[in-house]
Image (cartoon, rainbow, N blue to C red):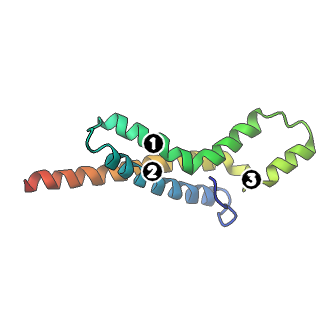
Amino acid sequence: MFYNQSWMGYGIVGGMQAGAIAAAVGFFMLLLVRWLTRKQRWIPGRELGVAYLLALLPSSSGDLWNLFYFNYANLQSPVFLSAALADVHDPDSIGLRVMCEFLGVAVGLSVAWLLLLWRDRGRARDA
Protein backbone atom coordinates (compact mmCIF):
# COMPACT_ATOMS: atom_id res chain seq x y z
CA MET A 1 0.00 0.00 0.00
CA PHE A 2 1.22 3.44 -0.82
CA TYR A 3 -0.01 5.15 2.29
CA ASN A 4 1.21 5.45 5.86
CA GLN A 5 0.63 2.14 7.62
CA SER A 6 1.87 3.23 11.03
CA TRP A 7 -1.68 3.32 12.42
CA MET A 8 -2.35 -0.29 11.43
CA GLY A 9 -2.20 -3.16 13.88
CA TYR A 10 0.23 -6.04 13.87
CA GLY A 11 -0.37 -9.64 12.87
CA ILE A 12 -3.90 -10.73 12.05
CA VAL A 13 -5.36 -7.39 13.16
CA GLY A 14 -3.25 -5.53 10.60
CA GLY A 15 -4.12 -8.14 7.98
CA MET A 16 -7.82 -7.68 8.63
CA GLN A 17 -7.46 -3.89 8.42
CA ALA A 18 -5.57 -4.18 5.13
CA GLY A 19 -8.19 -6.63 3.86
CA ALA A 20 -11.01 -4.25 4.75
CA ILE A 21 -9.31 -1.43 2.85
CA ALA A 22 -8.76 -3.76 -0.12
CA ALA A 23 -12.44 -4.81 0.02
CA ALA A 24 -13.53 -1.18 -0.22
CA VAL A 25 -11.16 -0.63 -3.16
CA GLY A 26 -12.49 -3.77 -4.89
CA PHE A 27 -16.09 -2.72 -4.33
CA PHE A 28 -15.63 0.70 -5.89
CA MET A 29 -13.38 -0.62 -8.67
CA LEU A 30 -16.09 -2.97 -9.93
CA LEU A 31 -18.60 -0.12 -9.87
CA LEU A 32 -16.13 2.03 -11.81
CA VAL A 33 -15.40 -0.68 -14.38
CA ARG A 34 -19.13 -1.33 -14.83
CA TRP A 35 -19.77 2.39 -15.29
CA LEU A 36 -16.91 2.83 -17.79
CA THR A 37 -17.96 -0.20 -19.87
CA ARG A 38 -21.74 0.20 -19.66
CA LYS A 39 -22.12 0.83 -23.39
CA GLN A 40 -19.83 -2.02 -24.46
CA ARG A 41 -21.61 -4.69 -22.37
CA TRP A 42 -18.58 -6.73 -21.31
CA ILE A 43 -19.05 -10.32 -20.29
CA PRO A 44 -19.00 -10.85 -16.50
CA GLY A 45 -15.67 -12.69 -16.51
CA ARG A 46 -13.85 -9.88 -18.23
CA GLU A 47 -15.49 -7.29 -16.02
CA LEU A 48 -14.54 -9.10 -12.82
CA GLY A 49 -11.02 -9.90 -14.02
CA VAL A 50 -10.20 -6.35 -15.03
CA ALA A 51 -11.71 -4.96 -11.84
CA TYR A 52 -9.73 -7.46 -9.73
CA LEU A 53 -6.42 -6.59 -11.34
CA LEU A 54 -7.09 -2.86 -11.20
CA ALA A 55 -8.09 -3.10 -7.53
CA LEU A 56 -4.90 -4.99 -6.65
CA LEU A 57 -2.74 -2.13 -7.93
CA PRO A 58 -3.57 0.46 -5.27
CA SER A 59 -4.46 -1.94 -2.48
CA SER A 60 -1.66 -4.50 -2.37
CA SER A 61 1.11 -3.48 -4.72
CA GLY A 62 3.37 -2.02 -2.02
CA ASP A 63 3.15 -5.03 0.29
CA LEU A 64 3.40 -7.45 -2.63
CA TRP A 65 6.55 -5.70 -3.86
CA ASN A 66 8.11 -5.86 -0.38
CA LEU A 67 7.28 -9.56 -0.14
CA PHE A 68 8.87 -10.22 -3.53
CA TYR A 69 11.88 -8.02 -2.76
CA PHE A 70 12.71 -9.70 0.54
CA ASN A 71 12.54 -13.14 -1.07
CA TYR A 72 14.61 -12.46 -4.18
CA ALA A 73 16.84 -9.45 -3.49
CA ASN A 74 20.47 -10.00 -2.65
CA LEU A 75 20.52 -8.69 0.93
CA GLN A 76 23.67 -10.34 2.23
CA SER A 77 24.68 -7.48 4.46
CA PRO A 78 22.92 -7.11 7.84
CA VAL A 79 23.09 -3.34 7.38
CA PHE A 80 21.18 -3.46 4.08
CA LEU A 81 18.66 -5.90 5.51
CA SER A 82 17.98 -3.80 8.62
CA ALA A 83 17.67 -0.65 6.50
CA ALA A 84 15.16 -2.35 4.18
CA LEU A 85 13.15 -3.81 7.06
CA ALA A 86 12.98 -0.45 8.82
CA ASP A 87 10.78 0.92 6.01
CA VAL A 88 8.22 -1.89 6.26
CA HIS A 89 5.39 -1.92 8.78
CA ASP A 90 5.21 -5.34 10.48
CA PRO A 91 7.63 -7.33 8.29
CA ASP A 92 6.86 -10.51 10.28
CA SER A 93 3.30 -10.66 8.92
CA ILE A 94 3.75 -9.27 5.43
CA GLY A 95 2.65 -12.53 3.80
CA LEU A 96 -0.51 -12.60 5.89
CA ARG A 97 -1.24 -8.99 4.99
CA VAL A 98 -0.81 -9.70 1.25
CA MET A 99 -3.13 -12.72 1.49
CA CYS A 100 -5.74 -10.65 3.34
CA GLU A 101 -5.48 -7.95 0.69
CA PHE A 102 -6.02 -10.47 -2.11
CA LEU A 103 -9.01 -11.97 -0.29
CA GLY A 104 -10.33 -8.50 0.58
CA VAL A 105 -10.42 -7.48 -3.07
CA ALA A 106 -12.32 -10.67 -3.89
CA VAL A 107 -14.84 -10.00 -1.10
CA GLY A 108 -15.34 -6.41 -2.24
CA LEU A 109 -15.90 -7.50 -5.82
CA SER A 110 -18.37 -10.16 -4.68
CA VAL A 111 -20.41 -7.71 -2.64
CA ALA A 112 -20.48 -5.21 -5.51
CA TRP A 113 -21.44 -7.96 -7.95
CA LEU A 114 -24.32 -9.08 -5.75
CA LEU A 115 -25.47 -5.49 -5.34
CA LEU A 116 -25.45 -4.96 -9.10
CA LEU A 117 -27.35 -8.23 -9.68
CA TRP A 118 -29.95 -7.22 -7.10
CA ARG A 119 -30.31 -3.79 -8.72
CA ASP A 120 -30.65 -5.26 -12.23
CA ARG A 121 -33.30 -7.75 -11.06
CA GLY A 122 -35.27 -4.93 -9.51
CA ARG A 123 -35.15 -2.96 -12.75
CA ALA A 124 -36.20 -6.00 -14.80
CA ARG A 125 -39.12 -6.66 -12.46
CA ASP A 126 -40.32 -3.05 -12.65
CA ALA A 127 -40.18 -2.95 -16.45
The residue sitting at 61% across, 45% down in the picture is 61
What residue is shown with label 2? 26
Discs 2, 1 touching: Cβ within 8 Å = yes
Pick whichever, 96 or 82, lies toward us. Answer: 82
Mark-to-mark CA distance, 1 and 3: 25 Å
Q: Is 63 situated left or right of 37 in this image?
A: right
Q: Where 106 falls versus 12 (above or below)?
A: above
Evaluate whether residue 100 shows in this view.
Answer: no
Q: Where 69 falls versus 122 (above or below)?
A: above
Checking the image for residue 20, the label placed there is none
Query: SS for tag 2?
Result: helix
x, y percentage for residue 74? Answer: 83, 33
Q: Earlier in the sequence, mark 1 or mark 3?
A: 1
What residue is shown with label 3? 88
10 Å neighbourhood of mark 2: few (<14), some, or many (≥20)?
Answer: many
Checking the image for residue 52, the label placed there is 1
The residue sitting at 61% across, 60% down in the picture is 13
> How many numbered dots are placed on residues in this image?
3
The residue sitting at 87% across, 49% down in the picture is 82
Discs 1, 3 touching: Cβ within 8 Å = no
10 Å neighbourhood of mark 3: few (<14), some, or many (≥20)?
Answer: some
Q: Amino acid at mark 2?
A: Gly
Evaluate whether residue 36 shows in this view.
Answer: yes
Q: Earlier in the sequence, mark 2 or mark 3?
A: 2
Q: Where 113 falls versus 6 (above or below)?
A: above
